[in-house]
Image: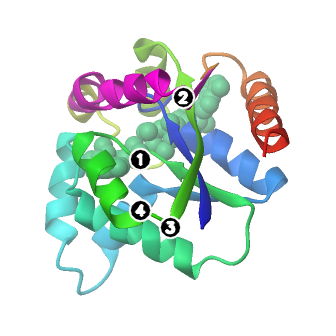
Amino acid sequence: MHNVVFVLGPPGSGKGTICAKIQENLNYVHLSAGDLLRAERQREGSEFGALIESHIRNGSIVPVEITCSLLENAMKASGDAKGFLVDGFPRNEDNLQGWNKQMNGKAFIQFVLFLSCPVPICIERCLNRGQGRTDDNEESLKKRVETYNQQTFPIIEHFKKSELAREVKSERPVDEVYADVVNVFNEANKQK
Ligand SMILES: Nc1ncnc2c1ncn2[C@@H]1O[C@H](COP(=O)(O)OP(=O)(O)OP(=O)(O)O)[C@@H](O)[C@H]1O
Ligand SMILES: Nc1ccn([C@@H]2O[C@H](COP(=O)(O)O)[C@@H](O)[C@H]2O)c(=O)n1
Ligand SMILES: [Mg+2]
């Protein structure tokens, strides 16, 4: 059974940045759903490349069968770890239902880390990210934020109701955010 921490928050809230630091220090493996989809988009011979690119540009969500299989394959391919940081997933109801169906009995959700950050700050960060992403432009960002508000936030609310969500405010300097996140992980691992 894989231990899993879902990491959610608006685009640019710092999910990737914080997961990289957790991976470095706490023996969790970072799996970004967005990164896995971008890699699949680039893979020669992929039947999903064009579909994935269209969703990414439009800030819409790729069907779960594709994303969940990429995540499961990456978990299988990974060595021993305390758990997996599943960054940017589940993003909507389809993601959540698909995960429950495909990963039933294979994964244990430790908790859901919710990085909360005001949207204008998030947009500014994405526009200044400088990674050449095809969706870091005003038009795509508007759609990504819309998708976040309409589809992802209700999933976070769902996890809040089941008391799995742990919110950390991420508009602060990275080191401050990270220190609070480490406390969340320590608390969760103490209870096990
Ligand atoms: N706490 C912070 N303060 C200032 N800048 C930050 C902070 N956290 C991350 N950043 C910067 O903001 C940008 C977006 O961060 P990151 O890629 O980690 O966000 P993300 O939540 O993974 O975004 P996306 O959902 O678009 O993948 C990066 O350039 C990163 O260096
Ligand atoms: N569960 C997911 C995660 C991501 N996507 C698509 O990838 C885009 C980029 O995601 P980031 O987490 O790297 O920002 C996102 O806007 C979606 O188009 C997805 O479909 N499903
Ligand atoms: Mg990211």
Q: Residue at x 20, y 57 (%)?
A: 63
Q: Nearer the viewer, residue 5 or 13?
A: 5
Q: Residue at x 72, y 25 (%)?
A: 177
Q: CA distance from mark 1 to mark 4?
A: 16 Å
Mark 4 CB in 8 Å range of ligand 2? no
Instruction: Please tell me whether residue 160 belongs to the stretch shown in magenta.
Output: yes
Q: Secondary structure at mark 3?
A: loop
- Residue 99 horizontal/vertical position (percent): 35, 56
Q: Left of 180 or right of it: where is 123? A: left
**Span highlighted in magenta in the image:** 143-167
Which quarter of the figure has residue 73?
A: bottom left
Query: Residue 55, labelled with which disc?
Result: none
- Residue 93 horizontal/vertical position (percent): 25, 40
Relative vertical location of residue 191 with respect to residue 24 in this rendering, above or below: above
**Three-letter amino acid code at the position of disc 4:** Asn
Query: Residue 104, labelled with which disc?
Result: 4
Tell me if I can see residue 130 in this picture: no
Identify residue for label 3.
106
Q: Secondary structure at mark 2?
A: strand
Q: Secondary structure at mark 1?
A: loop
Q: Earlier in the sequence, mark 4 or mark 2?
A: 4
Identify residue for label 1.
89
Say which of marks 3 and 2 sits in front: 3
Q: Residues within 10 Å of mark 2 (few under 14, many from 20)?
A: many
Identify residue for label 2.
114
Instruction: Please tell me whether residue 16 belongs to the stretch shown in magenta.
Output: no
